[in-house]
């Protein structure tokens, strides 16, 4: 999501863009040209530029481990799961930077219904390819960092950790309690999550964990890039499917596409219907909604908080099909 009300310098440029121009000019000199802002998200800003004649992207953020995870995942890039090569990472003035190849295409979020229908088979193949990725040396479940174990010993423990505050999202409990929504919906959803995590599979797959937030590019029927792996975690591969299902209604242009049906038809054509499908999806849908509530409270986004709270309450009353 784009940042709003950026601080500007005397030329009217966003302050961080001015700093980006200075950084690139100082570091690369005449090797670099044509810097322009691509987008500013929650954790980083991205700029297109040309470096040594190559179409590139430079990103700036406060969490260098996010860029290192991009670098790890680029090693598993394939035709079905294209991840741009990360050419360089390092420290910037108040954080970190990463330079990667720039992929063609449009952001998935910007596609209309016709373009989304064309891109959807490729997106589902990307999920299949991700399921096959195995990163050596990373144990555990939940959020992982390069070269270290993931955050939880079991998949249920990773999911139940949604009730905890983190360094990136501090103070959300106080903010939620002070909001017009209050903590009630979160409590109901969390209690249901505690019931549902029993019996989940303990298989471990890499999960992107943020596919619907301007992190996939498409060109016609082809997925051209899956980017920003900062939220990547280890757990049940169906979590990414649940992510699409949860956020799909937030895109009015896609309302004519039944994503749940498309996913089930895809699974039927490939490996067959996953075991205990409805139970697993319901568990992850509730977790995604709870996680969204923590972030909305942290950011004081009351409208989004209310919408996610309503969704969590409805999901908490749902019984998985038998």
Image: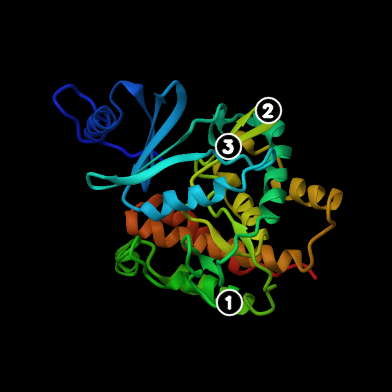
Q: Which residue is drawn at 48% across and 55% down?
A: 231
Tell me if label 2 and label 3 are in contact, CB under 8 Å.
no
Which numbered tag is attached to residue 154? 1
> Does residue 171 appear in this view?
yes
Q: Which of 186 and 266 is in front in this view?
A: 266
Q: Which of 214 and 249 is in front in this view?
A: 214
Q: Which residue is drawn at 52% across and 60% down?
A: 289
Is residue 232 placed above or below 98 in the rendered structure? below
Which numbered tag is attached to residue 114? 2
Q: Position of residue 77 (x, y in %)?
A: 62, 43
How far is the residue under mark 2 from the one under mark 3?
19 Å
How far is the residue under mark 1 from the one under mark 2?
40 Å
Q: What element carries label 1?
A: loop
Q: Position of residue 285 (x, y in %)?
A: 60, 61
Q: In which quarter of the image is residue 300?
A: bottom left
Q: What element carries label 3?
A: strand
Q: Which of disc 1 and disc 3 is earlier in sequence?
A: 1
Q: Residue at x 46, y 58 (%)?
A: 292
The residue beneath circle 3 is: 225
Q: Which of 153 and 304 is in front in this view?
A: 153
Q: Which residue is drawn at 59% across and 73% down?
A: 155
């Amino acid at each position: 999501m784009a940042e709003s009300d950026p601080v500007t310098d005397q030329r009217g440029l966003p302050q961080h863009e001015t700093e980006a121009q200075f950084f690139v000019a100082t570091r690369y000199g005449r090797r670099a040209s044509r810097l322009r802002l691509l987008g500013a998200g929650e954790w980083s800003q991205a700029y297109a530029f040309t470096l040594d004649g190559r179409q590139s992207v430079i990103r700036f953020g406060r969490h260098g481990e996010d860029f290192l995870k991009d670098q790890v995942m680029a090693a598993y890039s394939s035709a079905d799961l294209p991840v741009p090569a990360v050419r360089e990472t390092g420290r910037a003035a108040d954080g970190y930077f990463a330079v990667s190849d720039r992929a063609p295409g449009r952001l998935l979020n910007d596609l209309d219904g016709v373009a989304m229908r064309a891109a959807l088979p490729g997106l589902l193949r990307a999920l299949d390819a991700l399921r096959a990725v195995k990163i050596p040396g990373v144990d555990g479940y939940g959020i992982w960092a390069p070269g270290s174990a993931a955050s939880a010993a079991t998949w249920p423990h990773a999911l139940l950790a949604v009730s905890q505050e983190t360094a990136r999202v501090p103070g959300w409990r106080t903010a939620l309690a002070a909001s017009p929504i209050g903590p009630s919906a979160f409590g109901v959803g969390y209690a249901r999550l505690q019931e549902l995590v029993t019996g989940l599979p303990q298989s471990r797959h890499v999960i992107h964990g943020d596919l619907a937030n301007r992190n996939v590019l498409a060109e016609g029927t082809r997925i051209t890039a899956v980017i920003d792996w900062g939220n990547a975690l280890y757990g049940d591969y169906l979590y990414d499917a649940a992510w699409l299902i949860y956020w799909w209604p937030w895109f009015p242009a896609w309302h004519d596409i039944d994503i749940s049906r498309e996913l089930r038809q895809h699974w039927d054509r490939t490996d067959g219907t996953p075991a205990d499908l409805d139970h697993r999806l319901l568990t992850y849908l509730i977790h995604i909604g709870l996680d969204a509530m923590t972030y909305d409270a942290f950011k004081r986004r009351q409208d989004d908080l209310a919408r996610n709270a309503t969704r969590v309450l409805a999901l908490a009353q749902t019984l998985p099909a038998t």
